[in-house]
Image (spheres, coloured by chain):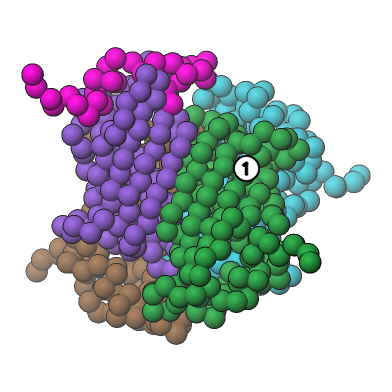
Chain colours: A green, B brown, C cyan, D purple
Amino acid sequence: MSVEATVRVIYGDTDQMGVVYYANYFRYFELARSELFRSKGGSYRDMEKEGRFLPVVDASCQYKASARYDDLLKVRVQVTEVRRASLEFGYQVRRDGEDTVLCTGRTVHACIGTDGKPTALPESVKRLLTPKDNHGP
Amino acid sequence: MSVEATVRVIYGDTDQMGVVYYANYFRYFELARSELFRSKGGSYRDMEKEGRFLPVVDASCQYKASARYDDLLKVRVQVTEVRRASLEFGYQVRRDGEDTVLCTGRTVHACIGTDGKPTALPESVKRLLTPKDNHGP
Amino acid sequence: MSVEATVRVIYGDTDQMGVVYYANYFRYFELARSELFRSKGGSYRDMEKEGRFLPVVDASCQYKASARYDDLLKVRVQVTEVRRASLEFGYQVRRDGEDTVLCTGRTVHACIGTDGKPTALPESVKRLLTPKDNHGP
Amino acid sequence: MSVEATVRVIYGDTDQMGVVYYANYFRYFELARSELFRSKGGSYRDMEKEGRFLPVVDASCQYKASARYDDLLKVRVQVTEVRRASLEFGYQVRRDGEDTVLCTGRTVHACIGTDGKPTALPESVKRLLTPKDNHGP
């Protein structure tokens, strides 16, 4: 199970080398994560209202080819691992209609409560996000 | 009374035209505002702890010449008007050691309380910020 | 004639006050401008390939109400003035499906050539962008 | 050999969780890299003028504790590996005057020429950046 978010590269995302600035892909990753939540009928905003937060504890990106101004990007995201109090997302960025992967990424998130301490992922979230939910009997 | 903040232009601030992206000057303005608070012995963070916030209600920038990657910029800020529940800052951006003004700006801030409603600027802030505080008898 | 761009507010667009950071609206404005170009069959990228650039010379925004994380925003843009070597855009930001204007903005752009000097807007652009193009005889 | 860059956290760097947004640390890393170049008497800008570019091919960050609005951060950077046509930097972020590491990071950069193809790091750059340059006979 994966979801694809769409991003139009604006001038403000590029740098003087004429390509998307490396830090901005992490913004795209976040947009894709929120689309994944929404696609399952929930939203990250709702989870926060219930006192659960998912701060990033580890993030990485491998840059293979450059995205440029005005490109329409597809950011594919899937959950790659679910643990008791953390989960991991994987990302691939492509141009719309192209197969070449421009970059891949990964973020690991702890689940914390309103007290800032690690807490179990809510069942609803585990259900929403488990990558195995399309496995039939 | 004015204060000058120093900003080194990073790659991430530029766009593919090779110059600082227009929205980023508003980030520089904010940095300069916070230095102005600090220069008077207070800090904007402290004011927030006392339940006063200064959201921007109006902002503008006139771009005259471009700042570029690696430039060391000086962002001059002064309070240009103080009203009961709002205040106004003016900005000029130059390269370090040069007279040419790259851009000028202006931000107007409302003073609101924790309930989100307009409230009088604290006396301490008025004192901190009044542009006339160096007028002797 | 106006065009509406859609923006999903991400975490990275907000600040610790829980609302969209003031500078980021100028990014939204840019996205809307590029949609306006595209809606008329051209693209700003193409214009640059022909050696015409439209740097911002003046920008402003009036903030009336706050956009928040996860909001789906509609950014309406129209050309409000066309001159020989410059043009002006106006913007209004609303939440999807709501009438309340969260903020209004304005940007003025010079038209420059590859030598960095002011040059007449290309006829194609004037045609693309003129706000009077739906005025009949 | 390492260098420390200083960053004041602005409102625009934070998100609604009240901490620095995860992508923004990569901006801080870039600032520190450019200080490292400058500290050795060169500048990344000069290297680009000579037709050598150092695009990021891999970047990662481990987030251990949060930086907050108005924090004065120290971003320590050192070269951790030099290869023929690439090099690697390591980063640690702390609050000024504190020992706790808020986050660590790493970026790997390819060296490419004006044709976009991998090319050997210039000798001057190897000399500037080698971590072993303070090893005597």
Residue B137 position in % (x across, y down): 9, 69
In percent of the image, x 51 and y 25: which residue is there? C116
Query: Mark 1 falls on what kind of element?
Result: strand
For residue D39, what is the image quadrant? top left
Residue B135 position in % (x across, y down): 15, 64
Towards the viewer: C26 or C83:
C26
Query: Is residue D116 a member of the stretch shown in magenta?
Result: yes
**Which amino acid, mark 1?**
Val
Considering every residue shown, the one lying at the far front of the view is A137
Query: Is residue B41 a member of the stretch shown in magenta?
Result: no
Quarter of the image with the C terminus of chain C in it:
top right
Specify whether D127 is left or right of C51.
left
Give the prevailing secondary structure in the magenta stretch. loop
Considering every residue shown, the one lying at the far bottom of the view is B115
The residue at which mark 1 appears reads as A93
Residue A129 position in % (x across, y down): 63, 65
**Local crowd size for mark 1, using a 10 Å CA cut-off: few (<14), some (14–19), many (≥20):** many
For residue C9, what is the image quadrant? bottom right
Specify whether A101 is left or right of A14.
right
In percent of the image, x 29 and y 26: which residue is there? D43
Magenta residue span: D110-137
Towards the viewer: C1 or A73:
A73
Q: Chain of mark 1?
A: A
Residue D121 position in % (x across, y down): 36, 18
In the image, is residue C41 above or below residue C65? Answer: above
In the image, is residue C12 above or below residue D29? Answer: below
In percent of the image, x 36 and y 28: which residue is there? D87
Considering every residue shown, the one lying at the far right of the view is C137
For residue D137, what is the image quadrant? top left
